[in-house]
Image (spheres, helix red, strand yellow):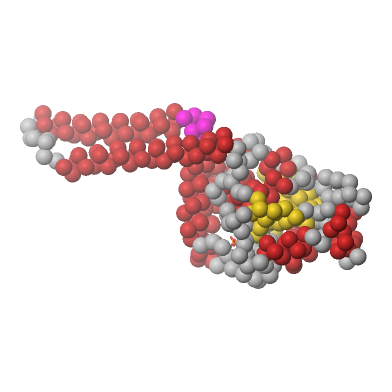
């Protein structure tokens, strides 16, 4: 059985000594109870076949379908699984951040808990990582999701993200990714930022590669996302653009906006002066024009203000050092777990 044969590949040896695994597989889980047993088996057999030491870290993100209880139960019987149970549903990014915090491997692999990603691809990603990359991102070349509501928005999103971040990947949204552990160690994640990890990593100077991976249709349960996420992702994209530009050259952002506003103001002022001085008409009675000016200025101010607020939020997150999630319970491999091996 996998469990026995993989024993020497685990985070603790038979005597309870700690071993740093070659890879930590991090899986965010939200209501995936039917998939869990298959997923854990598939990950274990893929890594065992590849002769890699590994640990699986399943982070339950406040599931309501018994996923947490099942994970706990499985974690008590096998020594390759650590179950991290969050107090409530914090979202996929937070669940991944929690997984990163508990991961001890030299490399970290993330994948979804719904079996849409194929664990058999993990060794391929790791091999690519070994070629000297810091991040290898999966590319779902034949993605099995609804065309109109999922594929189209993500095509647009991928294009936009590529433009904005200068990291042009075909498939930002693919959860199956491999990282050198140093890379994720001090990332401050929030919102939907997990999908921008390649962009954040690139800003830090990471070498990034993309590798085609398999993708399967969801067998059990349903997707947790709809169109609403596209909107949130777009807002995060604006933030990234802002971080990238503002944090290096603030004057480029506000200077441009200032110039633009000055330019429009001058044009309007010139137009009004022309009407008053040359045509001799009264300019006091033009509510529409005034409204235009007010709207323009208010728009610019609100926009800048929104960006500033985002920056403040980021500073807030980073300075607080406060986690974006709370852990209720951790069930990790102990020497006792091996009882289940018999
Ligand atoms: N997920 C999570 N917290 C959430 C929503 C989703 O941990 O609030 C997990 C979910 O269990 C899955 C992964 O994130 O493992 C991706 O979710 P899903 O498969 O629903 O997204 P899709 O593949 O449809 O983009
Ligand atoms: Mg999915």
Residue 32 as seen in the image, left or right of residue 261: right
Quarter residue 101 falls in? top right
Foreground residue among 281 and 233: 233
Q: From the viewer's perspective, is residue 173 above or below residue 303?
A: below
Residue drawn 82% across the image and 62% down it: 77
Q: Is residue 221 magenta?
A: no
Foreground residue among 186 and 259: 186
Bounds of the magenta segment: 245-250
Foreground residue among 177 and 68: 68
Residue 182, position as x, y percentages in the image: 72, 39
Query: Can residue 175 be spotted in the picture?
Result: no
Quarter occupied by the C terminus = bottom right
Residue drawn 54% across the image and 57% down it: 154
Residue drawn 60% across the image and 37% down it: 321
Q: Is residue 249 magenta?
A: yes
User: How many labels were placed on the picture?
Assistant: 0
Q: From the viewer's perspective, is residue 340 above or below residue 10?
A: below
Residue drawn 36% across the image and 40% down it: 302
């Amino acid at each position: 059985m996998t469990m026995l044969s993989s024993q020497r590949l685990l985070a603790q040896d038979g005597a309870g000594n700690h071993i740093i695994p070659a890879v930590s597989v991090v899986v965010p889980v939200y209501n995936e109870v039917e998939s869990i047993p298959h997923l854990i088996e598939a990950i274990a057999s893929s890594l065992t076949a590849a002769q890699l030491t590994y640990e699986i870290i399943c982070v339950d993100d406040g599931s309501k379908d018994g996923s947490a209880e099942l994970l706990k139960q499985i974690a008590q019987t096998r020594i390759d699984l650590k179950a991290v149970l969050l107090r409530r549903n914090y979202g996929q990014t937070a669940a991944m951040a929690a997984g990163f915090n508990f991961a001890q491997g030299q490399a970290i692999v993330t994948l979804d808990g719904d079996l849409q990603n194929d664990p058999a691809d993990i060794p391929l990603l790791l091999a690519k990582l070994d070629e000297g990359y810091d991040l290898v991102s999966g590319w779902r070349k034949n993605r099995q999701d609804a065309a109109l509501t999922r594929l189209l928005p993500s095509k647009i999103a991928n294009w936009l993200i590529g433009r904005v971040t200068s990291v042009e990947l075909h498939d930002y949204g693919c959860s199956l990714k491999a990282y050198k552990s140093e890379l994720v160690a001090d990332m401050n994640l929030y919102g939907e930022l997990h999908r921008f990890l390649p962009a954040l990593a690139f800003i830090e100077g990471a070498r990034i590669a993309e590798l085609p991976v398999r993708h399967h249709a969801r067998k059990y349960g349903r997707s947790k996302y709809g169109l609403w996420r596209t909107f949130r992702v777009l807002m995060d994209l604006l933030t990234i653009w802002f971080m990238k530009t503002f944090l290096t050259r603030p004057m480029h952002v506000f200077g441009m906006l200032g110039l633009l506003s000055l330019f429009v103001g001058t044009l309007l002022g010139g137009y009004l002066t022309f009407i008053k001085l040359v045509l001799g008409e009264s300019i006091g009675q033009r509510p529409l024009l005034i409204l235009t000016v007010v709207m323009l200025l208010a728009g610019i101010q609100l926009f800048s203000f929104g960006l500033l607020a985002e920056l403040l939020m980021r500073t807030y997150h980073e300075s607080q050092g406060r986690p974006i999630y709370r852990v209720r319970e951790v069930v990790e491999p102990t020497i006792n777990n091996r009882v289940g091996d018999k």
